[in-house]
Amino acid sequence: MTHLRLGVNIDHVATVRNARGSAYPDPVRAAKLAEDAGADGITAHLREDRRHITDGDIDRLMATLTRPLNFEMAATAEMQAIALRHRPRAVCIVPEKREERTTEGGLDVAADVARLTDYIAPLRDAGCRVSMFIGHDPRQIEASARIGAEVVELHTGHYCDLHAEGRLADRDAELAALAGGARLAHSLGLEVHAGHGLTYDTVAPVAAFPEVRELNIGHFLIGEAIFVGLKEAIAGMRRQMDRARVSSA
Ligand code: PXP
C-alpha cells in the first residue's frame, strides 16, 4: 500500500500561547519539532478571527519549514489574497463559523459550485494543491471533482464523536460511509485525505482505507504532548498508522 502521510496541525499550540497573550509556546517551534519527529507536513488554520494561528505565524512557517505547509482557510477574498502571497504547497478550503469551537461540518461544495470553481482557479494557477474539507456525501465529492479540486479531505469528526459516545453501531455505519466516500473520490481521480478528531483509539480504521494518502491530526497530538512530549506523541501516531496500513495490506 502507498505511504500514508501524517500532517501535524499545530493550531492548538497557538491556542495555549494566545490564552495568555504571551510569545510562548511558539507554534513554529512545535512545527520544527514535528518535522524532526517525522511529520510529512504541517497544517495550520488561519481563522478569520485569528483565535489561534496569526498572520505572523504563517509568515514564519513559510520562512522556516522544510516540509510542505497545508494552509487551511475559509473561502474568503482575504484568505485567497494571503494564500496567493505565500503560495503554500497545499490549501484546504474549510467552512468557518465565528461561533463554532472547531470546524463542525464539511463544506457545502454542491451548493456553491460556480463560486468555488472561480475561487480555487487562481490558487491552482499559483501552484497550490487545493483540497476541499467535506463529509462523505457523494454529492459533495462529485461537486469537488467538478470544481477542479485535486484533493478532498473527508471529515472524520462525526465518526470520532460516535466512538467517544460509545454508539458503536452508528460509529461503524459512519466508518462504512467514509470508506465508500474514499472509494468514490478515488474513482473520480481525487486524492483522498482525512482528518478531524482522530486519536490513537480511532485512527487505525481510517488509516487502513487504501485510498487515503494523508491524515491531518492536531488537537489530540498537542494534548498528548503535555504528557509524553510532542516527539513521542507523533511517533506513537506514526506507529498506529503504519500498523493499520500493514495489517490491512
Ligand atoms: N483537518 C481539517 C480540515 C481541520 O479543519 C482540522 C481542525 O483544524 C483538522 C484536520 C484536525 O483536527 P483535530 O485538531 O481535531 O485533529
Image (cartoon, helix red, strand yellow):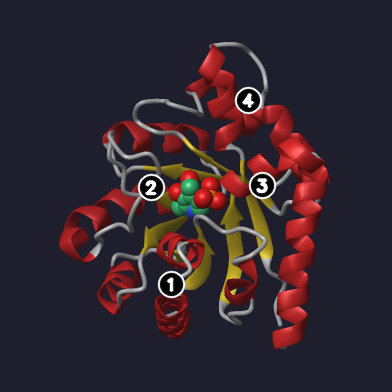
Q: Which residue is mark 4?
A: 60
Q: Amino acid at mark 3?
A: Leu
Q: Which residue is label 3 attached to?
A: 221
**Amino acid type for the residue under numbered disc 2:** Thr
Callout 1 touching callout 2 (CB < 8 Å): no
Is the residue 93 above or below the residue 98 in the image?
below
Residue highlighted by disc 2: 103
Q: Does the residue tagged 3 have its C-beta within 8 Å of any atom of ligand 1?
A: yes
Position of 114 with respect to 96 (left or right) is: left
Q: Quadrant of the C terminus?
A: bottom right
Q: Position of residue 101 (x, y in %)?
A: 38, 39
Labels 3 & 2 near each other (Cβ < 8 A): no
Q: Quadrant of residue 214?
A: bottom right
Q: Within 10 angstroms of label 1, few (less than 14), some, or many (20 or more) residues?
A: few
x and y percentages locating residue 160 in the rendered image: 49, 63
Residue 132 is situated, as x and y percent measured from the top left of the image, at 39, 59
Q: Is residue 162 left or right of residue 36?
A: left
